Amino acid sequence: MSATKEWLMNIEEKCWDDVADVIGECEHISEAMARAGAIFSQAGLIGYLSVEEIDEAVAEMWNEKWSTYV
């Protein structure tokens, strides 16, 4: 694996960790999606990942997190 790809993957993994932490603080999935978008945007990964991909992953994480409380 190239050093650049490994570097990008490490940044992406940290972003997903940050998103997982934020999901518990959000009151609605749209808030979680907006905050995830901001996290990835600040990391410069919009374009590497599309907004649709991020929103889809956030929806899965949201459902997994809150399904235990239903």
Image: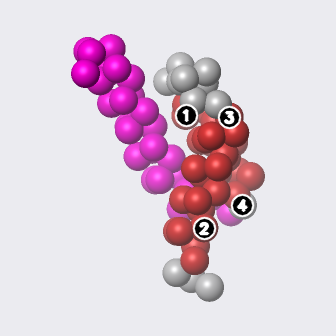
By secondary structure, the bulk of the magenta-drawn segment is best described as helix
Q: Residues within 10 Å of mark 2 (few under 14, many from 20)?
A: few
Residues at marks 1 and 2, CA–CA distance in whole angstroms: 20 Å
Q: Quadrant of the N terminus?
A: top left
Residues at marks 3 and 1, CA–CA distance in whole angstroms: 12 Å
First in sequence: mark 3 vs mark 1:
1
Residue annotated with mark 1: 39
Q: Residues within 10 Å of mark 1 (few under 14, many from 20)?
A: many
- Kindly check if marks 3 and 1 are in contact, taking CB atoms under 8 A apart as contact: no
**What's the residue type where badge 4 is placed?**
His
- Magenta residue check for 26: yes
- Magenta residue check for 4: yes
Give the quadrant of residue 40.
top right
Q: Quadrant of the C terminus?
A: bottom right
Compared across the picture, whether 21 is left or right of 54 comes to left
Q: Secondary structure at mark 3?
A: helix
Residues at marks 3 and 4, CA–CA distance in whole angstroms: 18 Å
First in sequence: mark 3 vs mark 4:
4
Residue annotated with mark 2: 63
Q: Which residues are magenta?
A: 1-27
**What's the residue type where badge 2 is placed?**
Asn
Q: Secondary structure at mark 4?
A: loop
Point 62% across, 40% down: residue: 53
Q: Is residue 44 above or below residue 33?
A: above
Residue 28 got which mark? 4
**What's the residue type where badge 3 is placed?**
Val
Query: Which of these two is toward me, 6 or 15?
Result: 6
Mark 2 or mark 4, whichever is nearer to me: 2
- Kindly check if marks 2 and 4 are in contact, taking CB atoms under 8 A apart as contact: no
First in sequence: mark 1 vs mark 2:
1
